[in-house]
Image (cartoon, rainbow, N blue to C red):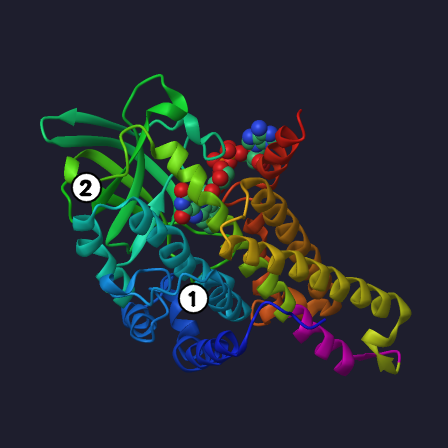
Amino acid sequence: MQRIIYDDDHESFRSSVHGFVEKCLRPRHDEMLRAHAIPRDVWRQAGAQGLLGLGIPEEFGGAGADDFRFNAILAEEVAAFSLGVSACLSIHSDVCSPYLVELGTSHQKRRWLPGMATGELVCSIAMTEPSGGSDLASLKTTARRDGDDWIINGAKTFITNGYGCDLAIVAARTTPDARAKGITLFVVEDGTDGFTRGRKLDKVGQDEADTAELFFDDVRVPDADRLGGLDRGFSEMMRLLPQERLATSVTSSGNAAQILGETIEYAKERQAFGQKIGSFQYNKFMLAELVTKIEVTQTFLDRCVMAHVRGEFSAIDAAKLKWWSAEIQNEVLDHCVQLHGGYGYMNEYRVARAWRDARVSKIWGGSNEIMKELIGRDLGF
Ligand SMILES: Cc1cc2nc3c(=O)[nH]c(=O)nc-3n(C[C@H](O)[C@H](O)[C@H](O)COP(=O)(O)OP(=O)(O)OC[C@H]3O[C@@H](n4cnc5c(N)ncnc54)[C@H](O)[C@@H]3O)c2cc1C
């Protein structure tokens, strides 16, 4: 089905992103897989092409696009190449930038946004802790007031861009025992005394992505580096999470659509019992179901993108989209592996990597169970 939300400007942007993927990302893929990181010069190339500051106002060095369709195209095209790379770029641009744009003081915006747009500053967001991520209101990292400063103590884990980031947006408890009403956000800069990283975590998939533990041992930050209101962190995170969930869903769907397309080509080439494997009725029907599921998902996704552009995208719609697109992605990729037979289990085949990369979609950014919990609550249960 023809997608109807993108006009000529968007499609020409898609071509330029495609060019960036082919010229700057694909030739460096092996290096990223080995380093578990996107090289710094690649971040700067993305910045130079205007890909890191889509939602950042022009006065702070961004494109001031204020049209999430451009973000969606970027996420979709990069995810078609690699889910891990798109995760790193998307956390920086679609997740972290809005916190600074929406909550930052003018001084904070001037200080950090231009570097984020050029790729000189890479940003992470640290909510999850070793003791739990789903129950965000119970987080244990503390920030204690000390004169004009705050002293942060605690640990975060599974943080995308964590090992190499220059800035971390950190959620910390500022009022004990107040659960959701006692959490505040801070920006912690690389090099601040007491702020250290653990190892790069050894993941099942997404080898390109830098995912790390962060430690805070009496980290002193000035009150000027507090982001948003005191004890308002939880409600700010809830307000901004729908965009994160939308971006994640775009990558899930874009990645699965691409790998399914490649698998259909494979099923036209590969022969068994003297015929193309895709022509066995079982496989033909299965592929028919998978392309249908992808198109139906894309249609809902596009509706959600437009709702977000209009400022009408709800947290509940974000929850529906996120679990659904993660589920479909995993279902599609599992069948794609099966259709590749033994080759589908070999890391040198894209389908194998994509299958490993996709598993986390049902866990991160709010697990599928938490998404259904939110939807269920909205139904009145
Ligand atoms: C590769 C990767 C990258 C990530 N990047 C980031 C990042 O950049 N920043 C960040 O802050 N976090 C990040 N995360 C963390 C991620 O968001 C959490 O892993 C996720 O929120 C789940 O938290 P948890 O791992 O502590 O699981 P838990 O909260 O311990 O949950 C364990 C299981 O219990 C289920 N469960 C929990 N509560 C309920 C309930 N009420 N009803 C039913 N089931 C429930 C969960 O769904 C899950 O299946 C990342 C994780 C991964 C793996």
Q: Using the image as rendered, state which of residue 21 and residue 98 is in the foreground.
A: 98
To which residue does mark 2 refer? 225
Residue 50 x %, y %: 34, 72
Majority SS type along the magenta span: helix
Within-10-Å neighbours for mark 1: few <14, some 14–19, many 20+: some
Q: Is residue 380 magenta?
A: no
Residue 139 x %, y %: 38, 28
In this view of the protein, can residue 137 be seen by the observer?
yes
Amino acid type indicated by mark 1: Leu
Amino acid type indicated by mark 2: Asp
Q: Is residue 263 above or below residue 364?
A: below
To which residue does mark 1 refer? 33
Pick the quarter of the image with the C terminus.
top right
Q: Earlier in the sequence, mark 2 or mark 1?
A: 1
**Secondary structure under badge 2?**
helix
Q: Is residue 266 magenta?
A: yes
Q: Using the image as rendered, state which of residue 283 and residue 307 is in the foreground.
A: 307
Q: Given this view, does label 2 or label 1 mark the residue nearer the observer?
A: 2
In this view of the protein, can residue 162 be seen by the observer?
no
Q: Quadrant of residue 51?
A: bottom left
Q: Is residue 107 left or right of residue 262?
A: left
**Secondary structure under badge 1?**
helix
Q: Residue at x 13, y 32 (%)?
A: 149
Q: Is residue 38 left or right of residue 379?
A: left
Q: Is residue 17 left or right of residue 124?
A: right
| Cα separation between marks 2 and 1 | 34 Å
Q: Residue at x 21, y 42 (%)?
A: 195
Tell me where the magenta segment starts and ends, as one range. Answer: 259-273
Within-10-Å neighbours for mark 2: few <14, some 14–19, many 20+: some
Q: Residue at x 50, y 68 (%)?
A: 73
Residue 280 x %, y %: 88, 72
Q: Residue at x 73, y 61 (%)?
A: 335
